[in-house]
Amino acid sequence: MRLATYNVEWFASLFDDNNRLFDDGVWSARYKVTRAEQTAALGHVFATMDADAVMVIEAPDHSPSQSTVIALENFANHFGLRAREAVMGFSNDTQQEIALLYDPEVLTARHDPKGPFAGRDGTTGAPRFDSALRIDLDIDATEDLVRFSKPPLELEVKTRGGFAFRMIGAHLKSKAPHGAENSAEILSIGIANRRKQLAQAIWLRGRIEEHLAEGTPLIMLGDLNDGPGLDEFESLFGRSSVEIVMGHGRSDALFDPHAVMALSRKLGAQPTSSRFWIRPEKRYLQALLDYIMVSPEFRSLRPVWRIWHPFDDPDCWRDPMLRDALVAASDHFPVTLDIEEPV
């Protein structure tokens, strides 16, 4: 069985208000890539991956005029993908949803949120992801309210062979310091936003620990937008979102070999899953942002992780069509996990 996570940059901009692909020569949100070119590139990447389920990060928008599920299923049908049914959870207002595209012949998946609904007043612990969390962000003895701009997607998954497990799709993101007028304000807003992101990671880890305590097999997939050596806030806060969500150093830690490698190295080569153009410096920045973390039950299923990086993965590099498609499709590259289904 192959599971994947894939952050598709501005997938929403490829669909009209009727959830149909534009597939034309107009520029997409990707720099100097048309909508037809990005659509074709994505179709080639999805078809080549041939995953049984893909956690789509930044999935098409869900609004009164658009449907994430219908758009994804139209995309899958357009390219004849096996993973042709979609499920999503709580929608958001960022035009970047989280959804699972899966093969119904291999597994079933349904949105199954856990935790108490706390509403806007919030509660401590791990409330439902469309609620609010009460947590002291700055150690001032006053509780702050934290919400997810993109509520994680909680799924109950069952394979056709009867193996049941949980999947959580997540996209944690620290907002840019909008409204800052000087370097001091940029720093202040940046620190506040990072505190909120780490609080979301603590919230997500709380849900993970609930499943681990129950002995439920669990896979966490998505873009944590944070990690060792990524920015100047690492030394300030001591821990990254990656370490918090994994439970790094704990006996019940989740496992992702790329995260473990990155956390164990201060210098030297590290795996990367994304590539961004830094305009002021006129160069590309590569970072490890995308993860598939698993609970201990999956370690015995002969797991194989792969980052489909067009320049780092030999098979991707040797296939010019796939290599070019990965570059045109998104500023992130897919991560896959191949496992044997338990008998």
Image (cartoon, rainbow, N blue to C red):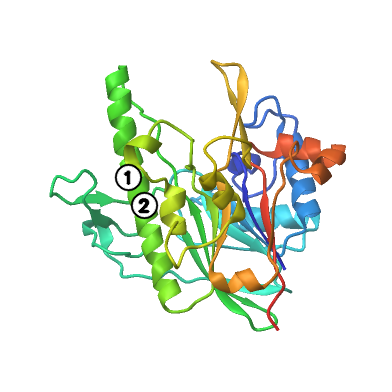
The correct choice, above or below, for 214 with respect to 316 in the image is: below
Residue 185 at least partly seen: yes
* Quarter of the figure with residue 160: bottom right
Q: Residues within 10 Å of mark 1 (few under 14, many from 20)?
A: many
- Rendered-image quadrant of the N terminus: bottom right
The correct choice, above or below, for 86 with respect to 224 in the image is: below
Q: Which residue is found at the position 56% from the left and 75% from the top?
A: 165
Q: Which residue is found at the position 31% from the left and 42% from the top?
A: 195
- Give percent across and percent down for residue 113: 43, 69
Q: For this rendering, which residue is in front, 2 or 79?
A: 2
The correct choice, above or below, for 187 with respect to 142 in the image is: above
Instruction: Say if mark 2 contacts mark 1, CB within 8 Å.
Output: yes
Q: For this rendering, which residue is in front, 337 or 74?
A: 337
The kind of residue on which mark 1 rests is: Lys
Q: Which residue is found at the position 21% from the left and 58% from the top?
A: 121
> Is 277 left or right of 310, judged from the image as shown?
left
- Rendered-image quadrant of the C terminus: bottom right
* Distance from the alpha carbon under mark 2 to that under mark 1: 6 Å
* Quarter of the figure with residue 32: top right
- Give percent across and percent down for residue 162: 65, 84
- Give percent across and percent down for residue 36: 75, 36
Residue topped by disc 1? 196
Kindly give the residue lying farthest to the left in the view shown.
141
Q: Secondary structure at mark 2?
A: helix
Residue topped by disc 2? 200
Q: Secondary structure at mark 1?
A: helix
Identify the disc placed on residue 124.
none
